[in-house]
Image: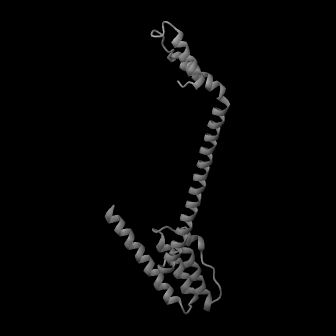
Amino acid sequence: MSLDPDEYADLCADTRQDPDFETRRLIVESPTAKAKRIEALRARCAGLIHKSEVFLHLTDEKSHSLKMRQAKLKRQRDRAAARLALEKLEKSIQVYDPLAAMREYEMLISCNAPYRKLDWHQFLQSSERDMNSAVSCVTDAIQQSEGVGSEWTLMSISSRSKMLRVQRESKERRG
């Protein structure tokens, strides 16, 4: 409780003139009076309090949307980096692609012989178990066309079927 110098002088003058100045005491606010004062201040500043709460909520939403945007950009960068890594891997290691193999087989067949279309559906729908039937389909087409690269193509088809057979057997041994 702070007093102005004028109030302090008045208080001192009153106590000097007052015969009971020893029994005089300062009035201290009770806890209920403090609570009433706090409520009055809150009521007077309610608009300011509400505006500050709204502002804090909006800044939270803005920071959340900023974080979401940053996470999205990070995912895009990670995907681009993964794509580049996959392209580098494909350049350094030969990845088996059945469609590319079929295009290569058709190109080899059609080089020195009239164009004959292979049965794509039989080749693509065949699973690893039916790979031998797909290989036989391709080998039949190659044998019919008697091209220059037919020996090489037959060799690559048979090596692929052997590799698949070995993979299947190793899976069966493990399982």
- Within the image, what quadrant is residue 114 found in? bottom right
Instruction: From this view, report whether residue 5 is shown above or below residue 111.
Output: above
Tell me the residue at 51%/72% (across/down): 86
User: Residue 131 in the image: x percent, y percent?
Assistant: 48, 72
User: Residue 149 in the image: x percent, y percent?
Assistant: 53, 90
Which residue lies most toward the top here? Answer: 19
Which residue lies most toward the right here? Answer: 47
Tell me the residue at 48%/7% (across/down): 20
Quarter of the rendering occupied by the C terminus = bottom left
- Within the image, what quadrant is residue 35 found in? top right
Tell me the residue at 39%/68% (across/down): 168
Q: Nearer the viewer, residue 165 or 20?
A: 20
User: Residue 107 in the image: x percent, y percent?
Assistant: 60, 85
Q: Nearer the viewer, residue 108 or 74?
A: 74
Instruction: From this view, report whether residue 143 is shown above or below residue 121.
Output: below
User: Residue 152 in the image: x percent, y percent?
Assistant: 49, 88
Is residue 131 in view from this perspective? yes
Please state if 115 lies on the left or on the right of 33 as rendered: right
Q: Nearer the viewer, residue 126 or 100?
A: 100
Please state if 41 lies on the left or on the right of 131 as rendered: right
Which residue lies most toward the left here? Answer: 173
Is residue 95 in view from this perspective? no
Instruction: From this view, report whether residue 115 is shown above or below residue 65.
Output: below
